[in-house]
Amino acid sequence: MTRKELETAEFDPVANIDVRRAAYLENRLRIEFGACSDVGKVRHNNEDHFAVIRRTRSRDVVLTNMPASDLSLPDEVSHVLIVADGMGGAAFGELASRLALRTADELMGSACGWISKLRDLNYRTTLDRIQAYADVIQEMLLECAEDDPRLAGMGTTLTCAHVLGADVIIAHVGDSRAYHLRDGMVQQVTRDQTLAQDLMDAGMSERDTRRFRHILTNCFSGERREVRITVYHLAVEAGDALLLCTDGLYDLVRDAEIAEALTECGDAQHACAHLTQLALDRGGKDNVTVVVGRFLPVADAG
């Protein structure tokens, strides 16, 4: 199996999770974030939305006669990166992406939400939970469209990465993308859920499928349909980077240029600004949104 197959395969059961949790506690990573979103040079409004969210669960021992070391546990910290690309015109796409992102954040922040601990990484439970969240988001958009028929044509993609230590769970709907950088090489993690990608999988050349590249086969929308969420797992290490973006970036910027920016730019925010400007310089035909997380050893903090 190639490295790409290993690192971008759909989520598999995580083996030896107790061993990996111990390694996480000993070798935690610091994450440096950056983000840019631009309306571009053609559109009149920005239908993209993004968020980078830090979640913590801490505990304080109020009273005890136990040795402090016996009750000392590190705070649980995770980060969530989300990109959503709306569609529908007349600001309805902007509404769809905002509502989907907001609902995803509310679900993950609920008492039983998302994955709170590394040892919670269970294959079936994780898939079922994330699909249940997708069903809620889709139902919410459907209810909005039923209340206001003008919203029936709105829709949105959603690509969400939940980072806990060296583990990243990526949930994906539509054609926004997640990329993983390691050793100066970038790999596309997610698979575009478009008619063009389906045709290429069936053997058609990329050139012959270009006119179908923006026809989504799966997205959240105000229409009654089933939404299938795809889940991926990545194991990251110091020196890696994770990039989430909308098609306004990757339609105009090559993978090699993404890798170069993530490798050569001084920090995550600089990389995002550089990539966004590349897309704008080449016409900015769509909204452009880029979110980057760079993984650094805790010792590099400062």
Image (spheres, rainbow, N blue to C red):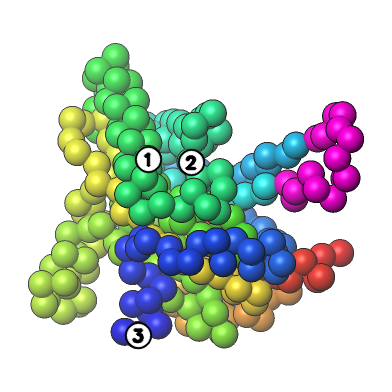
Task: Please state the extent of the stretch shown in magenta in the rendering.
Answer: 60-75
Work out whether residue 2 or residue 220 is closer to the camera in this orientation and state it.
2
Image quarter for residue 195?
bottom left
Look at 55% across and 33% down and name the residue there: 109
Work out whether residue 271 or residue 158 is closer to the camera in this orientation and state it.
158
Q: Which secondary structure type mostly characterizes the magenta part of the structure?
A: loop
Amino acid type, callout 1? Arg
* SS under mark 2: loop
Residue 130, horizontal then vertical, whole percent:
37, 43
Pointer 1 residue: 129
Of label 2 and label 1, which has the lower sequence position? 2
Amino acid type, callout 2? Trp
Look at 31% across and 54% down and name the residue there: 230
Of label 2 and label 3, which has the lower sequence position? 3
Residue 255, horizontal then vertical, whole percent:
44, 77
Amino acid type, callout 3? Thr
**Does residue 11 show up magenta in the picture?**
no
* SS under mark 1: helix
- Report crowding for label 3: few under 14, some 14 to 19, many 20 or more residues within 10 A (C-alpha): few
- Report crowding for label 1: few under 14, some 14 to 19, many 20 or more residues within 10 A (C-alpha): some
Q: Which disc is residue 2 wearing?
A: 3
Of label 3 and label 1, which has the lower sequence position? 3
Whole-number angstrom distance, CA of label 2 to CA of label 1: 7 Å
Picture layout, residue 15 above or below residue 98:
below
Pointer 2 residue: 114
Whole-number angstrom distance, CA of label 3 to CA of label 1: 29 Å
Picture layout, residue 287 above or below residue 224:
below
Work out whether residue 80 or residue 20 is closer to the camera in this orientation and state it.
20
**Does residue 74 show up magenta in the picture?**
yes
Residue 21, horizontal then vertical, whole percent:
59, 61
